[in-house]
Image: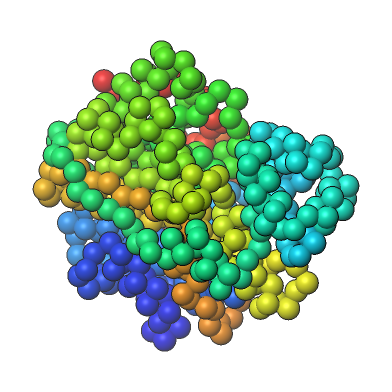
Amino acid sequence: MREYAQTTACYSRLWQAFDSSPAPDVHFLSPGALPSCYAVSDFAAASMALVGVWLARLNQTHAAPAIDRRLASFWFQGSVTPLNHPTPSLWDPLTGDYQTADGWIRLHTNAAHHRQSVASVLGKHAEKSTLAPLVRQWRAEALEQAVVDAGGCAAAMRTNAQWQTHPQGASVIQEPLLHERYTVPGRPFRGALSPARPLLGVRVLDLTRIIAGPVASRMLAGLGADVLRIDPPGWAEPALEEEVTPGKRCARLNLRQEIDKQTLYEILRQADVIVHGYRADALEALGLDAVARQHLSPGIIDVSLNAWGWTGPWRNRRGFDSLVQMACGIAAAGQQWQRSDRPFPLPVQALDHATGYLMAAAVLKGLHVRQTTGQGYQARFSLARTALELMRWPATAQPEFAPRNKHDENPALEWSAFGLAQRLRFPLWLSGTPVLWSRPPAPLGTDEPRWLTA
């Protein structure tokens, strides 16, 4: 239908990054859009559609998945509404956009060590009102580099034209959205890959944090996978744990200790899938480069993510969705679109969420490859490359979605260690394959670092 033409075109282009054959049919529902200068709602539905078509292929069914665009957009905002408990703030008090002597910069201080890095450059502050005057004394790119050199996270605001001529932006342009390769054959899966719970028995080692990777592993858990997330001691994501941990078991290992590192190696030996979001060379420092991962678990489906791309001078730089939006031109485009006097980002963290569903789709493709050829599979993505793809799709004139309503999304009640909440109905529907989580969300570090079964 005409109102879904751009959604279909966006989905077809994403499909071409995965497969050269014509894109399978997908039914899109719910016309309208989130307000944005880019087609965020089309992109949200298209990225979820990739999961649906690879799920259908894995299930060996010709049924076409359906995607509710409105619900997909809201899942990009967050799927959980607490009923008897507060939701912690997503942002640290100092995280935000600051005016500099020559433009704007975003400082990211959510993690304590990132806040300390900013303090080492600009001094300690309890609130933005005292920090802002000091930031205005700096040029944006100079402060960006100083914070990064101190081990922190920052991004100067650039236009898309400036980003394309920047060494990192020029490198990302040359990268594919999906970089993939086939690897050595592996053992047969323990699971039967049945349509009702297609990933039942498939072991997924989750070494991701914050949003994109956890969204991918949440999707896999919703299809029945045994997802084991590993975090270091002390790491917490209080604003996100209830959102991204349903269906998972969450454990801790201190990989600076040899005994815990050996435990991780043993977990990896028994894994069918690994998803990881470490910086480009971080796993190599643990003795777990791509070759080592394949050696420990031949044929493993290995899907990875980083922020800034896999080539270029920033390939090992820390980064988050909001920083990538600032650096690559999205926030500047929003500012112009909104006629604002300050950066104007997307209404949701679309780079994180879309990349998460692309990662989940790549895992399903890898499982299909293992199922049909016996080979292993490696894939990698970056938030910066996802941003480039989103920016190909300017918003079209569509009515804005009606506000979220506690009745029309048919939310499910969910009781967990966090309290009572409602979770939105999932936007993807494929006949015979419900997306269901077998465990409620749980705080990080709740479980033991081992698989459920021997």
State left or right for residue 50 relative to residue 341. Answer: left
State left or right for residue 340 relative to residue 262. Answer: right
Q: 324 or 434: which is nearer to us?
A: 324
Q: Where does the image place residue 300, in percent across and percent down from the top left? A: 24, 38
Q: Which residue is outermost to the top?
A: 259
Q: Which residue is outermost to the left?
A: 373
- Residue 441 can be seen in this image: yes
Q: Where does the image place residue 384, in percent across and percent down from the top left? A: 49, 58
- Residue 77 can be seen in this image: no
Number of disc labels: 0
Please, is residue 334 above or below residue 258 in the view?
A: below
User: Residue at the location (56% across, 54% down)?
Assistant: 321
User: Residue at the location (50% across, 29% down)?
Assistant: 231
Q: 281 or 107: which is nearer to us?
A: 281
User: Residue at the location (44% across, 61% down)?
Assistant: 172
Image quadrant holding the C terminus, namely top left
Please, is residue 39 above or below residue 120 in the view?
A: below
Image quadrant holding the N terminus, namely bottom left
Please, is residue 280 above or below residue 44 in the view?
A: above
State left or right for residue 206 relative to residue 405. Answer: left
User: Residue at the location (33% across, 58% down)?
Assistant: 178
Q: Where does the image place residue 184, in percent across and percent down from the top left? A: 15, 40
Q: 107 or 450: which is nearer to us?
A: 107
